[in-house]
Image (tube, rainbow, N blue to C red):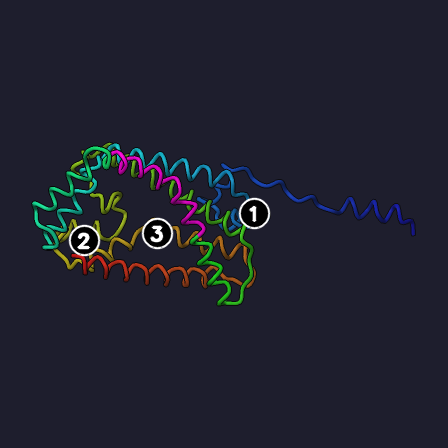
């Protein structure tokens, strides 16, 4: 047997691995074919570009939101709730609102929104990866940090692009006084309940919990479950989805209970 012929035939049969998709193809793929796209991301995880895009988008959206709504309008609803629940007098509320919305404090508050927007997505991605690693450990699966982080960043990006576009439209269609800062987009059950029963027509706990039943949150959990399963061993998308969903519901119940206690 000629070893050179054998080596040549083996080389011809080797199929070169496809080149990783570019950023835009991956983003579009998460929208329309998440399973295949996440599997491809797992083979060649990239984190720098999606993270930079998320940070820039978060910073810009934070600036546009507070610039359009205004510092006073943004915090006014919170003080109105405090007065209505008896936790604060109207006089004290007016004084604190004036202190927060004038002078140096107002400028600091205004520019803190872009700063928060800059860091919120990387921080959220790291938190979600940590949750995934915990779930994976409990169910006996296996995965690596970088593919999980890349999947999380692309998921946040895919969902946030759509929600940010909708938010921008609403910000500039409505007057600042008409914008509900506690429910900016209205993509949740609370928005429907408010239309049917009014903002104060149902118990605080029910309305607070209903805000967490949100289309974008459900979509994000679904994408994360598909993505984490695609880049993990011995992990099913259904199992990951149930685990993430249970954690989300638990957080929602705690947050709703806290909101109800605060009035």
For the residues marked 3 and 1, what is the alpha-carbon distance in whole angstroms? 24 Å
Q: Are marks 2 and 3 in contact (CB under 8 Å)?
A: no
Q: Residue furthest front?
A: 104
Say which label, 3 or 1, has the lower sequence index. Answer: 1
Residue, disc 3: 217
Magenta residue span: 107-126
Say which label, 2 or 3, has the lower sequence index. Answer: 2
Residue, disc 1: 40
Is 252 left or right of 74, judged from the image as shown?
Answer: right
Q: Residues within 10 Å of mark 1 (few under 14, many from 20)?
A: many
Is 31 left or right of 198, judged from the image as shown?
Answer: right
Query: Is 118 colored magenta in this rendering?
Result: yes
Residue 29 pos. (x, y %) = 49, 43
What secondary structure characterizes most of the magenta part?
helix
237 or 154, nearer to the observer: 154
For the residues marked 1 and 2, what is the alpha-carbon distance in whole angstroms? 41 Å
Task: Look at the numbered disc 1 and give the secondary structure of its residue.
Answer: helix
Residue 33 pos. (x, y %) = 48, 47
Is 250 left or right of 73, judged from the image as shown?
Answer: right
The quadrant in which residue 263 appears is bottom left
Q: Are marks 1 and 2 in contact (CB under 8 Å)?
A: no
Task: Look at the numbered disc 3 and give the secondary structure of its residue.
Answer: helix
Please count the marks in the image.
Answer: 3
214 or 15, nearer to the observer: 214
Disc on res. 193 = 2
Q: Residues within 10 Å of mark 3 (few under 14, many from 20)?
A: some
Q: Is residue 254 above or below residue 64?
A: below
The quadrant in which residue 59 appears is top left
Query: Is 250 colored magenta in this rendering?
Result: no
Q: Is residue 199 above or below residue 69?
A: below
The quadrant in which residue 119 appears is top left
């Amino acid at each position: 047997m000629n070893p050179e012929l054998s080596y040549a035939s083996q080389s011809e049969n080797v199929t070169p691995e496809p080149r990783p998709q570019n950023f835009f193809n991956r983003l579009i793929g998460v929208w329309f074919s998440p399973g295949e796209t996440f599997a491809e991301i797992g083979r060649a995880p990239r984190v720098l570009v999606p993270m930079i895009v998320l940070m820039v988008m978060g910073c810009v959206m934070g600036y546009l939101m507070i610039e359009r709504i205004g510092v006073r309008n943004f915090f006014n609803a919170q003080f109105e709730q405090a007065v209505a629940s008896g936790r604060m007098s109207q006089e004290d509320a007016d004084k604190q609102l004036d202190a927060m919305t004038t002078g140096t404090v107002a400028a600091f508050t205004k520019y803190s929104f872009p700063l928060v927007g800059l860091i919120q997505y990387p921080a959220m991605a790291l938190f979600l990866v940590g949750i995934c690693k915990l779930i994976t450990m409990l169910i006996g699966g296996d995965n690596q940090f970088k593919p999980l982080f890349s999947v999380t960043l692309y998921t946040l990006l895919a969902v946030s692009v759509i929600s940010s576009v909708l938010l921008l439209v609403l910000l500039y269609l409505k007057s600042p006084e008409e914008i509900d800062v506690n429910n900016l987009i209205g993509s949740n059950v609370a928005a429907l309940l408010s239309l049917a029963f009014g903002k104060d027509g149902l118990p605080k706990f029910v309305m607070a919990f209903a805000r967490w039943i949100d289309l974008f949150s459900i979509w994000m959990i679904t994408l994360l479950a598909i993505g984490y399963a695609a880049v993990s061993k011995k992990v099913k998308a259904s199992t990951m989805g149930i685990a993430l969903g249970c954690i989300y519901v638990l957080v929602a119940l705690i947050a709703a209970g806290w909101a109800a206690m605060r009035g």
